[in-house]
Image (cartoon, rainbow, N blue to C red):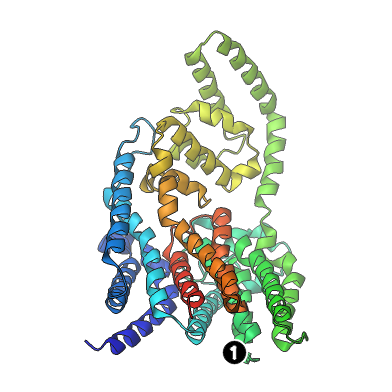
Amino acid sequence: MNLEKVIEKSRIILIIFMILQPIFDIYYLYTDKIISIFKFSPSTIIRMIFIIYLVITSYLILRKKIKFKYVALLGIIYFLYTVLHIYNSLNFLDTIPNYQSFSFVKEIFYIIRMLCPLLLVFVSYEKKITYKEIRKIVLAIYFIFSIVIIVTNFLGISLTSYADGNKIIKATFFDWFKPGIYDSVGYEYIASKGIFHMGNQISALMTMLFPYLMYIVLKDKFKVSNIIVLFLTMFSMLMIGTRIASLGMIAVLVASIVLYYFFKLKNKEKIRFEKNVLFPLIFMMLTISIYPYLPVANRTYADEMEAIILKRIKETGADLKLIETKEKIKELEKSNKEEEIKKIKTEFIRDYYEIYGMDEKYIIEYYNYELDPDFWFSAFDIRYKDRADHRELKTLLMHRVSELNNNKLDYLFGFSFTRPRNAHIYMENDILVHMYTIGIIGIILLIMPYLGITFYALYLMFKKKKQFNYMNMTLVFCILLVYLIGPLTGNVFDEWIVTLFLGFLTGTLLSYVKEK
């Protein structure tokens, strides 16, 4: 076997694999019809083939340097965690509604899905990808995402970023500026994600990689192609319409320019205003100037509905009825009349949930109020605005389920990913949701290694002064952004479109800081 050919071929395949990620994330590859044919999305199968090939070739190249006992030890640790996680997931209380749908195969696959990006850390560390190669990957990724999102928006065929994600937009960019458009259509049918799978995850990836795009724009000699890609990227991120994509982009742009000038001062370089800085600032000012017309600035549905619901509550006297019911319950609690209390709560919920704007899907279908009136009665104290996007509601539901299950091992090993997903009650808050799904040990083993490696890289950077540079700190910035975005948007550490890049950048950073 010609080792040099294997090394070169696997490097090229890794680069191609990363560039193809937008293609693998096309929505139509994740429809129920396609998944019913292959059992998994074709994208998942192809990604796994790539990863297996890359891991094997990387191991063949480094096999003499790697001590098998350490690989075996890691394998045993992850295997034991998986066994304990599955065992604990199976020992779940069978009286909790909608939480009985557990899939052994899907749960095992979920653990594999969380492990694969960690393997990519090893692959990208071994490949020692150069700046020119990362530049190709980042520019290609942004170009593909941006062109598809912009063109499909202009043609009016883009999928919405919201509204279940499989609906077509009802207004294009050209309609943003029409008076009353957001009243007649609504932002959820204007924000667009092209033909891609999930708006939140695309937002997370594009925001996560944005510091590196800014690095390319600011550090390269002035190139029109860089400026064009930056413009298309910023334009498409506004179209996506999420807070992370639209507002996060502006924050990251400013932070990237600050970081750029920090290292200029550190290196005692001459400070002057450059064209490379001018264009990002111009694009930022254009964004700010049209901000009132952006989808992200018109997420007013919850505010308007809250005013309508508050008015309805007062007109019907539902607020007074709630106070009266609470007082009656207090009296009954003194006599421990639990059945009567349950009946009163159930009747109140049945009579008033519509007036209070409770989502029927949740209160009837996902977690029926008759089975747990205590939870739903307490939910009447939550503001409508906090319930409208279901984040607060899902958080409370997950906590309630954990409370009812009453298993201390849940905190260590989690009570499964598939149960809350199948019950449609999966929290949109990474780290916190994984406290329930994979437990503290799962978080340490599957999510925190990237952060641990990054802190180790920072230690090496301060130890080796030459490694404390603009490029390495940009990579650190990209990685840390994922840990900031995850709790804000959710479903980040669950999706390969984000975590594969997280693994790739983490391994690349480590290879750079360990260079002699």
Identity of the residue drawn at 30% across and 63% down = 71
The residue lying furthest to the top in this view is 335
Looking at the picture, how far across and down is residue 481, in whole percent?
58, 64
Q: Is residue 220 above or below residue 18?
A: below
Q: Is residue 115 above or below residue 464?
A: above
Nearer to the camera, 102 or 73: 73
Q: Secondary structure at mark 1?
A: helix
Identity of the residue drawn at 38% across and 79% down = 14
Total marks drawn?
1
Q: Left or right? Give the position of 335 relative to 382.
A: left
Q: Is residue 134 above or below residue 255?
A: below
Nearer to the camera, 333 or 261: 261
Looking at the picture, how far across and down is residue 442, in whole percent?
40, 50
Looking at the picture, how far across and down is residue 41, in whole percent?
33, 64
Amino acid beneath label 1: Ser
Looking at the picture, how far across and down is residue 172, in whole percent?
61, 71
Identity of the residue drawn at 42% across and 67% down = 27
Q: Which residue is mark 1?
A: 225
Nearer to the camera, 226 or 24: 226
Quadrant placement of the N terminus: bottom left
Residue 426 appears in the figure: no
Q: Left or right? Give the position of 160 relative to 124.
A: right
Q: Left or right? Give the position of 302 relative to 348.
A: right
Identity of the residue drawn at 52% across and 30% down = 375
Nearer to the camera, 361 or 449: 449
Q: Is residue 162 above or below residue 232?
A: above
Residue 384 appears in the figure: yes
Which quadrant would residue 91 be assigned to in this image?
top left
Which quadrant would residue 349 be assigned to in this image?
top right
The residue lying furthest to the left in this view is 1
Classify mark 1: residues with Cα within 10 Å, few (<14), some (14-19) or many (20+): few
